[in-house]
Image: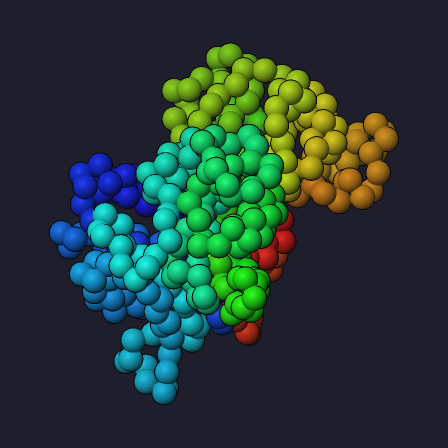
Amino acid sequence: MREITPQLRELLRTGTPFALATVVGVHGSAPRGPGAAMAVAADGRVVGSVSGGCVEGALYEAATEVLANGEARTETYGISDGDAFAVGLTCGGTLEVLIRPYGTQPRGGSAPTPGLLDLLDAVERGEPVAVATVTAGSAPLGAQLVIRTETGAGTGTAGTGIDGGSADGSLGHPWLDRAVADDARGLLAQGTPAVRRHYGARGQRRMDDVAVFIQAFRPPARMLVFGAIDYAAATARMGAFLGYRVTVCDARPAFATPERFPAADEVVRAWPHDYLARTVVDGRTVVCVLTHDPKFDIPLLLAALRTPAGYLGVMGSRRTHEDRLARLREEGVGEADLARLASPIGLDLGARTPEETAVSIAAEIIATRWGGTGRRLSELSGGIHRDLTAPKVEA
């Protein structure tokens, strides 16, 4: 949903009713994972996508019906009966999609839900926030609970019994709100979506299980690019395209200017190791060292190897790499830490230009994050799409 936030805000601002279709389950191979969203407005506009175009036509019709009757519903799309021309995913997978109306009078006994605009505001501010939605079971279909951590904003909801943060809305039962809030906090730490099933009692009656889709939103992962060179400019553009918050850092004032790096969120003039020591680095952070100058590289890499960064890529020839390893060993760096370095940086694509090199760097980052091989798909067998909810490096 994050990618269509501006369009959703515009629909809300103009008071245009719309149906929001969200992928809440994926089975087999599918082009997009849980959380992918598409909105169909009452005036016919469509924003977003839930597949590679395989099911959008059928989903448009279903969303139009949801807008007309105001009732949330689920749909399942996939290949059936071997009919390649039937509605479904040509890659052979199955999508479970929840379609929920906004801006219409809800029907079907839905529980109160929090405002979508408040959720979008929190996402745009970069606050850690999760939205939990009932997708099946005895709780009202489409009921939502928005959970914020202690560091997030929010007014909270009286009587929810939520500890360690605040919650708005309800899934229809206090015990379910408490249980799902616990799940959501764990998923926020991981930054991954998931479906959770819960059982509970209501009075003396045992309830059926309830399926809840939890989508966790976190601030964008960071890409730290060190070395204000032309390769850094191309890498910054690629990082921004992939959704990273990009910082370019260089100690040379003449080179580290915002004008040279328009795609970067910030340009910092500082010695790289000094900046890295004072900035926030977590398991999602990508570090690209493009300076290939020992007076910058060695202090920076010593600092970087003390962080939990998920990717440490270093530019340079193989000879430069061997010299760099020798210098780091002299500084007492062990082999396990040296093995964390992706050096020379990037995959073997035969890249020559800064833009091509940036693509090779991005390809290696993606492969590292999701456990890809980096090989040509035509040389491999089995499923093309990996499990999008279980990244190798924290997402």
As drawn, is 133 to the left or to the right of 44?
right
Residue 249 figure quarter: top right
User: Where on the picture, by quarter, is residue 6?
Assistant: top left
Left or right of 200 on screen, residue 6:
left
Up-down: is 110 above or below 303? below
Q: Is residue 380 visible?
A: yes
- At horizontal 29% and vertical 80% (from top left) the residue drawn is 86
In this rendering, the count of numbered labels is 0
The correct choice, above or below, for 96 with respect to 17 in the image is: below
Toward which corner of the image does residue 24 lie, by quadrant?
A: bottom left
Residue 346 image point, x, y percent: 58, 45
Above or below, 309 against 52 in this view is: above
* Residue 160 pos. (x, y %): 51, 43
Q: Is residue 379 left or right of residue 393?
A: left
Residue 139 vertical placement versus 265 (above, below):
below
| Most foreground residue, 162 or 67 | 162
Name of the residue lying farthest toward the left: 43
Which residue is drawn at the image coordinates 54% and 62% (left, top)? 203
Q: Farthest residue toward the top?
A: 253
Of residue 172 and residue 180, the one placed in the foreground of this image is: 172
Q: Say which residue appears at 70% left-offset and 41% top-offset.
A: 341
Residue beneath the point at 21% across and 62% down: 69
**As rendered, which of 36 and 194 lies closer to the eye?**
194
Q: Position of residue 94 (x, y in %)?
A: 42, 72
